[in-house]
Image: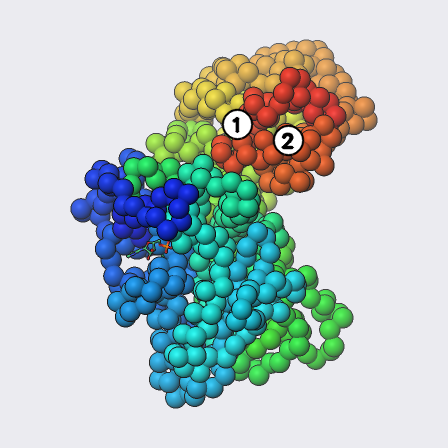
Amino acid sequence: MDPAVRVAVREAPLRRHFQNNNNKNQTATIALNPQRTVHYPPDCNNALVVDGTVYSFDHVFERGVSQAKLYEELIHPLILKVLSGHNCTALAYGQTGTGKSYSMGLSLDAEYLDDEHIGVVPRCLADIFDGLAASQENAESTDVSASFIEIYNENVYDLLASAEAPVLIRVQKFSGSTRKPIRNQNEFRELLIQGTASRHVRSTNMNANSSRSHAIFTIHVRNARLNIVDLAGSEGLRRTGHEGVARTEGVHINQGLLCINRVLLAMSAGNRVIPYRDSVLTTALQESLNCQSYFTLLACISSEPCDLSETNSTLRFAKNAKQLKLTPQQNQLQMDLLRKNNMTASKTTSTPIFKRPLSCSKRPLGIRTPFNTNLYTPGKIVRQRSDMGLTPRAKERARKLLHLDNVEAAASAATNAEQPSFLEPSAIFDPFADVNVACSTPMNGWTVGGLERTGAECSSIAVPSREEFDNLKHQYLDLTVILDKIYQVLTPQQRQHCALPATKAATKAATPNQMMSFIGRRELSRETPAEQPERVETSLLQTSGDSVIAEQTTVQFRVSRSPSEMAAESAKQDSFQSPSSNIGASASVSESAAALNLQRTRLPLRRSTRLLSRTEFNPTENLKDRRRSERISRKSIKKETSPANTQKVASRQRLNKHSADMLELLNSGTAKQLQLLPTIGAKTALALVTQRNLMGSFEDWAQVEKLPAWRGSGFKRFKEANCLVL
Ligand SMILES: Nc1ncnc2c1ncn2[C@@H]1O[C@H](COP(=O)(O)OP(=O)(O)OP(=O)(O)O)[C@@H](O)[C@H]1O
């Protein structure tokens, strides 16, 4: 099966520098630096090394590769997809002057219009005609048409509307752009020349004919479309030597490129909201850049030392694109179904995720469709949230299917084993869960496990060995989830003795560094209310006749620590004595192990609760003492569950959420949006966005506070005005 996303890198020939010495006609070739920053490891295909970093992509085209080879390997597979009804996008990205327009065939260099040098667009069209002819269809019909737009300074221009000049279009979603039928290569050539001649180009220090706009050439074949996108070059404003209008152009170009990067990142992360509307470029590409289409990226790079930072940034962009997970193949089935049922529909929309269709009860009786057909046109496949497994019921179904075997095996092991074995090693992987869990228990006697928040699309986490877990544990610390899963595999009898609550709500509320649990052992059983946020719970592990030999104790508590503290904590836990070695051992051994564990982990439990745990380990304590400790415990529980305390906890949670949301806003907001925040003016907003772009996302408020964007007590004022309790 062809991959839906392919990423290639092409190294540009050494640039013919163009000097703009106030004389636009004067060009000069500068002595080029023989040093190269791009290297190709001899024993590794499709990889390259830049600045000590190894990158690997689907294709790596070294300098001097022919246009024909690039087309055959990279673009030709898309033609087959377009002909079979899929939307495809081929996008050229890179620094200015690295051959994007040349590769895509959207440059009008007269010397390069021969067969050897023609680029992607003309070759695509030839192949599409051949494909249609081969499928016995009339290639001369108006089945094939083209539109050509450019996005210049955040305005959309129709390059085919008029032969004289590009026409500004304001029609929503670009449906108003001119679509001209193409019946043969000659017609196409005329269109291409008309369009490319109308493009905004400018002579810069880096490229004599630098495109100042993002261009999208779209070939429409029946209901499918192939977008060939030639992005304007990413550029450092200083290097291009631009001022005035040209500088504004540069700002808009970079803004579009930034937004497309953000869209790719959001799609790779499986976010449900993709920021298509942040720029005109991404809005234009919205229909084709979604999980139902094929996507190919050509990253053009330069190997000259002076271009190293741009080359690195292009490669980072390509790396982000490689993370994309598109699933157009899944739509094929639905398309076949549609064709078979000969469904027709009237409406279509570009967003891949739709509102819930009419509920079953509202649908006309007797009609059972796999999805709401009203939303579909033939050949256009749009999936419901349930089709993608995103609704709770779909998730539950998938979870059941996935875990049935695991659960059965674990349950039977738990019932049959002589030793209490409900903590059998089990790996739980749920691709549909928002919170994904991996767990392997027990490891050296201690339950370990993990949690990862990866959005809708989760990746597998396996914890096969102790060493690997050691490497991963910094990320995976929420054992409550695992305990919850373990609870699911208990037999009813074990469940009676095990007070592990299914703390789903608590789990959801917790972030990996807010919740932590560990399992210890102690001697005596104790009933505690299941609703307590901090608790000590026990379950029967092994009995001999009437006497209890060992019990399982679970202590759950919330902590808020830095990753380094958590790592130190995990290291401490690792050194604990294995509780499995305590099974059948004397009460005092169990007691000391548990007491030691409680001490070592510096539990943030109340003193009274800690005292209670200690006294419970002593089987010889008298009744009076026990009653006293029970009284203390009841008091502490009452205090914690008092309305005032609950209110305090709730308000703390709200404040935490508020500051997390604010951080998210700082990470994703545009300068305009940030300006709306109290105490943030235009300058600070711009500075924040710039610093964010340079540094990547802000990880925490400490990082934000240190930014040079705040002048004087700017951050303090911002904090107060925005009610941030950090
Ligand atoms: N592989 C190549 N072989 C021959 N010439 C090339 C190659 N790549 C680029 N060129 C030439 O280099 C010059 C710059 O290329 P081009 O205009 O395609 O760059 P670009 O990346 O589109 O730049 P910009 O982003 O500024 O528009 C052109 O004259 C082009 O013909």
Of the numbered discs 1 and 2, the one sitting upstream in the chain is 1
Q: Secondary structure at mark 2?
A: helix
Q: Dot 2 corresponds to which residue?
A: 683
Judge whether residue 500 can be spotted in this image: no
Q: Dot 1 corresponds to which residue?
A: 518
Identify the residue shown where x is 27% and y is 42%: 30
Judge the density around disc 2: few (<14), some (14-19), many (≥20) Cα neighbours within 10 Å.
few
Identify the residue shown where x is 60% and y is 40%: 668
Residue 503, relative to residue 292: is it above or below? Answer: above
Residue 450 in the image, given as x and y percentages of width and height: 48, 36
Q: Is residue 3 left or right of residue 519?
A: left
The answer to which image quadrant residue 640 occupies is top right
Q: Residue 637 bears which disc, if any?
A: none
Judge whether residue 195 can be spotted in this image: yes
Ligand 1 closer than 8 Å to label 2 CB = no
Judge the density around disc 1: few (<14), some (14-19), many (≥20) Cα neighbours within 10 Å.
many
Identify the residue shown where x is 46% and y is 24%: 567
Q: Which quadrant is the C terminus positioned in?
A: top right
Q: Nearer the viewer, residue 215 or 666?
A: 215
Q: What amino acid is at disc 1? A: Phe
Q: What amino acid is at disc 2? A: Lys
Q: Which quadrant is the N terminus positioned in?
A: bottom left
